[in-house]
Image (cartoon, helix red, strand yellow):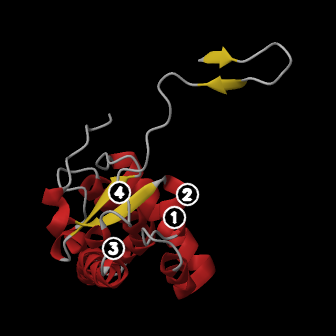
Amino acid sequence: MSYSGSGNGGGTWRSGGGVPPHAFDPWEQPDLFRGVLTRRVFAFLIDLVVLVVPVILAKVFIALFGVVTLGLGWALFWLVWPASVVWAIVYYGSSIGGPHSATIGMRMMDLELRTWYGSSGYFVLGATHAVLFWASVSFLSPLVLLIGLFNGRRRLLHDIILGTVIINSSVRTQVTPAARAY
């Protein structure tokens, strides 16, 4: 960092590297954001099915195991809720942190998560994205989608907090890929 200006306090601090601009501009690349909110709703529903099916199968297994063990196996039902939370965090973290930067539902809807500077997602970002999404939906219910209507990048509250953006990956080939941040 360097300081430019006179000694009277009229100068400004300047960073040599500076802060990079947003990688995805809704005015220059409107196709990246067209239909993103609608696709996100359908991607969420698909991901919800992917998350719920193994939980239902686990509950059926525990129920049958409880019958075979004359009721002793039913004590495992207390593990279902914590295991469901862990399953959801691992699912979102590994899929967003994977090579596609998208969950199964997002890939089916041609969406991918990127950071504001263009890098792809990573495990901690995906897990945190899921936790903040569920927290914001818990408090704001479906009203969380209204935030996306009032900004050009169609970002929701948890996207803004984390500095992420969801883009239409079917037109992604026109955008130069950014370096992956580890």
> Mark 3 — residue?
73
Rounded to the nearest angstrom, the CA distance separating label 3 from label 1 is: 39 Å
Q: Label 2 is placed on what type of residue?
A: Ile
x and y percentages locating residue 32 in the rendered image: 28, 68
Q: Secondary structure at mark 2?
A: helix
Q: Nearer the viewer, mark 3 or mark 1?
A: 1
Q: Residues within 10 Å of mark 3 (few under 14, many from 20)?
A: some
Which residue is found at the position 43% from the left and 63% from the top?
A: 130
> Mark 4 — residue?
24
- Label 3 vs 4, first from the N-terminus: 4
Q: Secondary structure at mark 3?
A: helix
Mark 2 near mark 1, Cβ–Cβ under 8 Å? Answer: yes
Q: Residues within 10 Å of mark 2 (few under 14, many from 20)?
A: few
Screen quadrant of the N terminus: top right
Q: Residues within 10 Å of mark 4 (few under 14, many from 20)?
A: many
Q: Residue furthest right?
A: 8
Residue 101 seen in this snapshot: yes
> Mark 1 — residue?
158
Residue 132 seen in this snapshot: no
> Mark 2 — residue?
161
Rounded to the nearest angstrom, the CA distance separating label 4 from label 1 is: 18 Å
Is residue 41 left or right of 98 when viewed as pictured?
A: right
The image shows residue 60, relative to residue 127, as above or below, that is below
Q: Residues within 10 Å of mark 1 (few under 14, many from 20)?
A: many
Q: Secondary structure at mark 1?
A: helix
x and y percentages locating residue 50 in the rendered image: 24, 76
Q: Label 4 is placed on what type of residue?
A: Phe
